[in-house]
């Protein structure tokens, strides 16, 4: 094959197979070489193919490769075909490049773990599954990768399974995402029934002819696909699994939040944009879910004390921004923010992991402090990631990607002042909890002794990610900044142009308001946690505010709500059901069989006379029967 596209997913799969079947016989250096090396090679091939694709010009830029026919039954044909275009290239680059840096980091972070090979085997399978998801040319193959990342998230969230809480978190993630996956499967059946195909390119071409604008069936299909995306991307109302997923090792959290699991929903909606464009209702629901999630998750992050849970709720909020952009028709802005977010969120999780590891596995930010001068590399890289998360104007990549979404939330065809106001409030909250996290972790008195400092295998990936967290945003500048549009020019080959209904000249005003929101959030965080921390204590004495804080801290009570309306009734029914008539039937068969066994066992007395007597009686019975016949 002239095109090495198949090698991109094949190399991580090969690493998984080597480690799964022979990892126990390999040294740790060989395990790291197989695990991290395979993903690094995959990243190099992605860069090589991506360079060729980008140079193909406006009329080219799509690679497709059919490996074999998977299913061919009764007129239904599904092939293992990989397709790389501008949209999948962005995702493949993030998966392989950031995945490679996370693997290199993991070689140092997990070195002391007894299940070193199992960890890298699961990580490689995770990368392979996500690559299948984004490279699939048909929805059935995409669904295979979709379920693969669900399996791997279960394996890695519960990696330290000796702790029952970790196993519970893994089961919770697996169960909740199955709800969305089931809805998505029903949506795929409907797509095939209506169109006769699951090939993405064919659906894209047929959709405008098959369905009328706002037709009921296309709305139902879009909402079913959205349910799948909501589950994987931890958006309302299926968001409760993600904070508990922090039970896994920090590199797992970085991979889930930056390059794999939670970004799958964004990819699905962007890839199937033609269906969502045919339903105003479905697109509006996408925008509303994104806006609500970004706000709820932001308020919750303000109250958390576990540094990884702050980042988890931050991811929910940032994915909410992406859903908001998808919902208003700003497809390119959503994918652009996905790419930028991947860099700074991977950086923040890996830096947090270095802090936790150095402080004897301490997660509580209120027990950290004073790390600014003691861990300078981690501090500066974390600061860059935090600046990008908070969207500090001009100097951080997060400003350019989030500014686009804020602008389109007002000015795009599906935008509105209310969505813009929610997004702006979310920007203020993000800057506030990010500043709070920085102050508690790096400033003030040192509360926990540093056990050891991270090695180069952990710090070099931080430096690389910090570099991209600064410069990645400059590949797409706003209209009033010269409108350098390298990213959007690439995306518009596969995604439609965003329709603006607002004069571009007013963008300065919106950028100024966004900057004020960011600086306002930074000021609030600095004032209450840097200058006047006693004010927070005073606020906690207020009974109403303390109750509000507890409500936000609990994730707005969603876990408790689901426990009351779903979990407890289910457990109650299963307790009744375990002793139903069917179970009694099988229990009765077992009891009768056991009684007959005990009766028969009495004949095994060990006495030869009884055995001879039994044989004689048996012979007499048999002869008697024959004579009667």
Image (cartoon, rainbow, N blue to C red):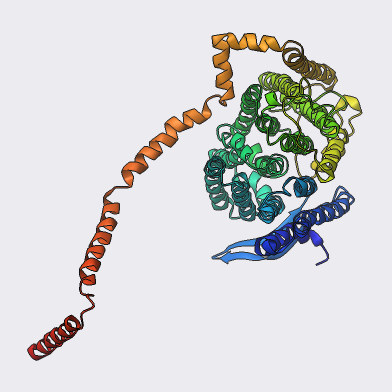
Q: Quadrant of the C terminus?
A: bottom left
Residue 252 figure quarter:
top right
Q: Nearer the viewer, residue 460 or 5?
A: 460
Q: Quadrant of the N terminus?
A: bottom right
Percent x, y for residue 461? 82, 43
Above or below, 272 relative to 363: below
Numbered disc total: 0
Which residue is pictured at 58% across the width and 42% down the height? 228
Residue 235 figure quarter:
top right
Above or below, 556 relative to 189: above
Percent x, y for residue 490? 83, 43
Percent x, y for residue 223? 57, 38
Considering every residue shown, the one lying at the far left of the view is: 628
Which residue is pictured at 66% across the width and 37% down the height? 277
Above or below, 544 relative to 440: above
Percent x, y for residue 343? 79, 38
Q: In this orientation, does residue 611 appear? A: yes
Q: Nearer the viewer, residue 343 or 352?
A: 352
Q: Nearer the viewer, residue 356 or 575?
A: 356
Q: In this orientation, does residue 501 appear? A: no
Which residue is pictured at 61% across the width and 62% down the height? 77
Considering every residue shown, the one lying at the far right of the view is: 482
């Amino acid at each position: 094959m002239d095109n090495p596209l198949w090698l991109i997913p094949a190399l991580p799969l090969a690493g998984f197979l080597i480690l799964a079947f022979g990892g126990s016989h390999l040294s740790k250096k060989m395990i790291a070489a197989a695990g991290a090396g395979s993903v690094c090679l995959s990243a190099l091939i992605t860069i090589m193919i991506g360079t060729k694709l980008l140079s193909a010009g406006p009329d080219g830029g799509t690679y497709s490769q059919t490996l074999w026919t998977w299913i061919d039954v009764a007129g239904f044909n599904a092939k293992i075909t990989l397709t790389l275009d501008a949209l999948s290239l962005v995702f493949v680059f993030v998966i392989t490049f950031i995945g490679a840096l996370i693997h290199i980091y993991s070689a140092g972070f997990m070195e002391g773990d007894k299940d070193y090979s199992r960890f890298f085997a699961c990580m490689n399978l995770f990368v392979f599954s996500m690559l299948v998801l984004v490279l699939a040319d048909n929805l059935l193959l995409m669904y295979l990768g979709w379920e693969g990342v669900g399996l791997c998230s279960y394996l890695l969230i519960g990696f330290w399974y000796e702790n029952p809480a970790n196993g519970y978190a893994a089961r919770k993630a697996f169960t909740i995402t199955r709800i969305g996956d089931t809805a998505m499967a029903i949506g795929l059946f409907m797509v095939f029934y209506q169109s006769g195909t699951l090939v993405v390119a064919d659906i894209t071409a047929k959709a405008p002819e098959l369905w009328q604008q706002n037709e009921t069936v296309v709305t139902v299909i879009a909402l079913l696909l959205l349910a799948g995306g909501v589950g994987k991307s931890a958006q309302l109302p299926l968001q409760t699994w993600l904070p508990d997923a922090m039970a896994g090792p920090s590199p797992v959290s970085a991979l889930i939040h930056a390059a794999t699991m939670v970004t799958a929903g964004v990819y699905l909606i962007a890839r199937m944009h033609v269906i969502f464009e045919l339903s105003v209702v479905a697109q509006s629901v996408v925008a509303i879910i994104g806006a609500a999630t970004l706000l709820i998750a932001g308020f919750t992050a303000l109250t958390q004390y576990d540094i990884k849970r702050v980042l988890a709720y931050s991811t929910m909020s940032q994915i909410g921004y992406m859903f908001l952009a998808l919902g208003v028709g700003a497809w390119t802005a959503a994918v652009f923010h996905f790419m930028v977010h991947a860099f700074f969120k991977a950086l923040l999780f890996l830096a947090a992991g270095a802090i936790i590891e150095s402080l004897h596995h301490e997660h509580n930010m209120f027990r950290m402090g004073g790390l600014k001068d003691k861990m300078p590399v981690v501090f500066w890289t974390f600061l860059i990631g935090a600046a990008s998360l908070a969207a500090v104007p001009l100097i951080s990549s997060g400003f350019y990607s989030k500014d686009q979404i804020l602008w389109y939330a007002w000015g795009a065809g599906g935008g509105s002042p209310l969505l813009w106001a929610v997004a702006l409030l979310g920007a203020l909250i993000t800057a506030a909890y990010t500043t709070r996290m920085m102050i508690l972790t790096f400033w003030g008195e040192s509360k926990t002794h540093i056990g050891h400092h991270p090695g180069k295998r952990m710090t070099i990936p931080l430096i690389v990610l910090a570099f991209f967290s600064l410069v990645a945003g400059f590949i797409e500048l706003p209209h009033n900044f010269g409108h350098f549009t390298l990213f959007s020019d690439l995306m518009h080959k596969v995604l439609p142009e965003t329709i603006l209904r607002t004069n571009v000249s007013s963008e300065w005003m919106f950028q100024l308001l966004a900057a004020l929101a960011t600086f306002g959030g930074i000021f609030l965080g600095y004032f209450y946690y840097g200058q006047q921390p006693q004010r927070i204590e005073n606020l906690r004495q207020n009974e109403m505010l303390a109750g509000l804080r507890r409500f936000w801290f609990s994730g707005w009570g969603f876990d408790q709500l689901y426990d009351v309306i779903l979990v407890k009734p289910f457990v109650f029914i299963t307790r009744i059901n375990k002793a139903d008539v069917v179970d009694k039937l099988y229990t009765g068969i077992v009891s009768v069989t056991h009684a007959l066994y005990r009766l028969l066992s009495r004949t095994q007395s060990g006495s030869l006379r009884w055995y001879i007597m039994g044989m004689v009686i048996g012979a007499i019975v048999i002869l008697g029967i024959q004579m009667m016949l």
